[in-house]
Amino acid sequence: MTTETEFKELKETVAVLAKKIDSINELLTKRLIETVEPLPDEVEAIKEYKEAKKNGTVELIPWEDP
């Protein structure tokens, strides 16, 4: 049977691991977002959207969950 001291040590270890995982997750997210260039069709879609927005021909449709 595990003692209270062992439980405290385990809890501390899990807390340290959770912090490290969060840090790694933040780093990966930052690196992935900053390094991914848009595809040519995405660039074209953005241009079309901006032009439509400028002309007032785009309509915002709210997202609805099924």
Image (cartoon, grey):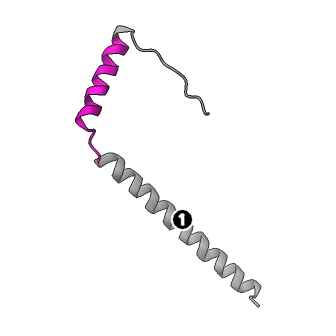
Q: What span is colored magenta in the figure?
A: 36-54
Q: Which residue corresponds to the image point at 38% horizontal and 51% vertical from the top-left? A: 30
Q: Nearer the viewer, residue 15 or 32?
A: 32
Percent x, y of residue 31: 34, 53
Residue 66, placed above or below residue 53: below
* Residue 66 magenta-highlighted: no
49 or 66: nearer the viewer: 66
Amino acid beneath label 1: Lys
Farthest residue, direction front: 66
Give x and y (percent) for residue 43. Answer: 26, 31
- What x and y, as percent, mark residue 1? 76, 91
Q: Main secondary structure of the magenta part?
A: helix
Which residue in the structure is indicated by mark 1?
Answer: 19
Kind of element beneath mark 1: helix
Using the rendered view, name the quadrant where residue 44 is placed: top left
15 to 32, vertically: above or below: below
Taking the spot 34% from the left edge, 8% from the top edge, the residue there is 55
Residue 46 drawn above or below residue 37: above
Quadrant of the rendered structure where residue 15 is?
A: bottom right
52 left or right of 62 in image: left
Q: Residue at x 69, y 85 (%)?
A: 6
